[in-house]
Image (spheres, grey):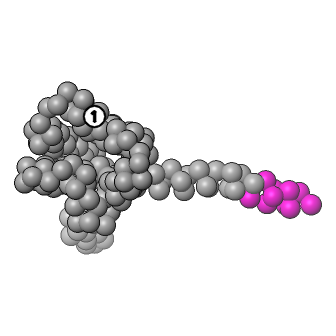
C-alpha cells in the first residue's frame, strides 16, 4: 500500500517538474541557436541593404537563405508586416518572442534608426560588429572555463593511469628486492 503511494507521489513530482525542465532546455537551445546565428544574419541584412534592397526585402533574404531559428523569426516578422502590422510592432514582438538582450538591442536600434532617419546600412553594420565582438567575448569566456571543467575527468581517468604506468616498474623492483628477504 505504501509502495503505491510512493510511486504515485514520484510520478506526480516527475509530471510536475519534467515538463518545466524540458521546456526550459528547449528555450535555452533555441536562444543559443539564435545567438549563434544573429551576427551572420545581420551581416546578410547589411549586405542586402547596402546593395539597395529595402529592409523588408533584406529580411526576406535572411528568411530564404537559412533554415534556422533566426531565419524563422525574421520570416515570421516579415509575414506579420505583410499582413498589416506595423514594422515597429512586428519587430518588438519578434524580440519579445526570442527574449535575448542582443535581439532586443538590435530591434531597438532598427526602430530608432527609422524614427530618426539614420542610414539603415550604417546601423546594421554597427550592430553586426557589436554582435561579432560579443560572440568573440563569449567564446573567450568559455575557453577560460575549459581548464576548470577538465580537472575532474583528468583526476578520475588520466592521473590514475599515469600513476599505474609510472609506479608499476618501481613496485615490481621493490617486491623482487624485498621478496628475497
Residue 122 in percent (x, y) is at: 10, 38
Image quadrant where residue 79 sits? bottom left
Residue 88 in percent (x, y) is at: 34, 38
Is 6 magenta? The answer is: yes
Which residue of the protein is positioned furthest toward the top in this rendering? 116
Judged left or right of residue 86, residue 164 is left
Judged left or right of residue 136, residue 115 is right
Q: Could you classify mark 1 by the number of other residues whose Cα lies within 10 Å: few (under 14), some (14-19), or many (20 or more)?
A: some
Nearer to me, 47 or 149: 47
Instruction: Name which residue lies at 20% across and 55% down.
Output: 58
Image quadrant where residue 104 sits? top left
Nearer to me, 168 or 30: 30
Instruction: Name which residue lies at 29% across and 38% down.
Output: 107
Q: Is residue 119 above or below residue 36?
A: above
Q: Is residue 180 above or below residue 152?
A: below
Res. 33 in view: no
Q: What range of the chain is rendered magenta?
A: 1-11
Judged left or right of residue 11, residue 31 is left
Image quadrant where residue 153 sits? bottom left
Residue 105 in percent (x, y) is at: 28, 35
Instruction: Name which residue lies at 62% across and 55% down.
Output: 18
Which residue, given by chain and number where applicable, does mark 1 sit on? 111
Instruction: Name which residue lies at 61% across and 55% down.
Output: 19
Dividing the image into 4 quarters, which one contains the C terminus? bottom left
Amino acid at each position: 500500500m505504501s509502495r503505491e503511494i510512493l510511486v504515485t507521489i514520484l510520478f506526480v513530482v516527475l509530471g510536475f517538474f519534467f515538463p518545466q525542465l524540458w521546456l526550459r532546455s528547449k528555450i535555452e537551445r533555441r536562444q543559443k541557436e539564435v545567438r549563434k546565428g544573429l551576427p551572420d544574419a545581420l551581416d546578410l541584412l547589411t549586405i542586402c541593404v547596402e546593395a539597395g534592397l529595402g529592409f523588408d526585402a533584406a529580411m526576406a533574404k535572411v528568411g530564404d537563405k537559412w533554415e534556422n531559428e533566426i531565419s524563422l523569426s525574421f520570416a515570421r516578422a516579415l509575414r506579420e508586416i505583410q499582413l498589416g502590422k506595423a514594422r515597429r510592432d512586428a519587430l518588438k514582438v519578434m524580440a519579445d518572442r526570442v527574449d535575448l538582450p542582443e535581439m532586443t538591442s538590435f530591434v531597438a536600434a532598427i526602430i530608432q534608426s527609422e524614427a530618426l532617419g539614420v542610414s539603415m546600412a550604417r546601423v546594421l553594420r554597427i550592430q553586426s560588429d557589436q554582435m561579432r565582438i560579443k560572440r568573440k567575448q563569449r567564446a573567450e569566456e568559455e575557453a577560460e572555463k575549459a581548464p576548470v571543467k577538465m580537472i575532474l575527468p583528468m583526476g578520475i581517468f588520466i592521473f590514475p593511469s599515469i600513476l599505474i604506468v609510472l609506479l608499476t616498474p618501481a613496485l615490481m623492483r621493490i617486491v623482487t628486492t624485498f621478496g628475497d628477504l
